[in-house]
């Protein structure tokens, strides 16, 4: 994904505000309790997954229910825009901010949408409680809090997301495209992007070198 420089994002603040309510509504009530829902877990791409956009990706699942699933890629760093440049484009003060968040590519869908995945010690109006430990916020409020030096203790800003229609993710898992592992805050929040996939596999005691497109664990 090629992210446009902030100066070429006309109306970014308006887009962000206007689409926030829509996305939070789509994610509402993400985990109804049915066994197999993956909300709050991490997906790990396997060799059987042929989509190059997700090769060796680790994805935190923010919502999974009968309507589909939505998640954020954890191991794709973005070099541009810089956090302070993005805040200036959004009209958020102070500039420079008192605190910055690492930016990442959250997925190939709607790359102008921003999502802050963060710890549960802070919540704003409309924030989505994913699993009791992790919260998803997409409002300007969380960025304002961070710019002023506050906000959640651990957080990262991701542009875009990964989405699946009803039953699509379940089918991909049956096709050996993904493994699942419990969420790990170091994998979610640290900036060692190049090793997140390998470290998550290590939690399952899997050597990446031993994987093939024909064997796996759903």
Image (tube, rainbow, N blue to C red):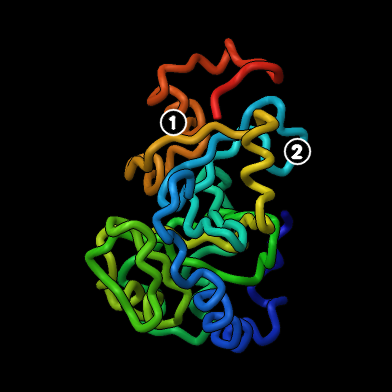
Q: Quadrant of residue 190?
A: top left
Mark 1, Cα crowd under 10 Å, few <14 / some 14-19 / many 20+, is many
Q: Could you say which disc has been placed on residue 200 in the image?
A: 1
Q: Could you say which disc has been placed on residue 42 in the image?
A: none
Q: Quadrant of residue 120?
A: bottom left
Mark 2, Cα crowd under 10 Å, few <14 / some 14-19 / many 20+, is few
Question: Which residue: 55% across, 35% down?
Answer: 44
Question: Which residue: 54% across, 86% down?
Answer: 17
Question: Which residue: 65% across, 71% down?
Answer: 112
The residue to which callout 2 is attached is 52
The residue sitting at the top extreme is 210
Mark 1–mark 2 Cα distance, whole angstroms, equals: 19 Å
Q: Secondary structure at mark 2?
A: helix
Is residue 145 positioned above or below 207 on the image?
A: below
x, y (%) of residue 60? 48, 49
Mark 1 or 2 closer to N-term?
2
Depth check: give the residue in front, 16 or 212.
Answer: 212
Q: Quadrant of the C terminus?
A: top right
x, y (%) of residue 124? 33, 79
Decide if residue 18 is in sight here. yes
x, y (%) of residue 117? 42, 61
The residue sitting at the front extreme is 34
Q: Quadrant of residue 181?
A: top left
x, y (%) of residue 11? 66, 87
Decide if residue 89 is in sight here. no
Q: Quadrant of the N terminus?
A: bottom right
Q: Secondary structure at mark 1?
A: helix
Question: Which residue: 40% across, 46% down?
Answer: 188
């Amino acid at each position: 994904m090629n992210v446009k420089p902030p100066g070429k994002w006309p109306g970014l603040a308006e887009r962000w505000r206007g689409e926030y309510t829509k996305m939070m509504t789509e994610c509402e009530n993400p985990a109804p309790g049915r066994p197999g829902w993956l909300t709050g877990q991490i997906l790990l791409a396997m060799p059987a997954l042929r989509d190059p956009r997700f090769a060796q990706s680790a994805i935190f699942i923010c919502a999974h229910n009968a309507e589909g699933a939505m998640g954020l890629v954890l191991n794709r760093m973005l070099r541009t825009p810089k956090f302070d440049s993005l805040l200036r484009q959004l009209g958020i003060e102070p500039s420079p901010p008192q605190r910055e968040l690492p930016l990442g590519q959250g997925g190939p869908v709607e790359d102008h949408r921003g999502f802050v995945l963060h710890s549960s010690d802070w919540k704003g109006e409309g924030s989505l409680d994913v699993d009791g430990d992790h919260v998803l916020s997409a409002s300007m409020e969380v960025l304002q809090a961070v710019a002023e030096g506050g906000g959640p203790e651990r957080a990262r800003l991701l542009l875009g997301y990964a989405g699946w229609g009803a039953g699509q993710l379940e089918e991909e898992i049956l096709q050996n495209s993904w493994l699942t592992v419990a969420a790990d805050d170091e994998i979610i929040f640290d900036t060692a992007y190049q090793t997140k996939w390998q470290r998550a596999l290590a939690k399952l005691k899997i050597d990446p070198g031993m994987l093939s497109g024909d064997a796996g664990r759903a």
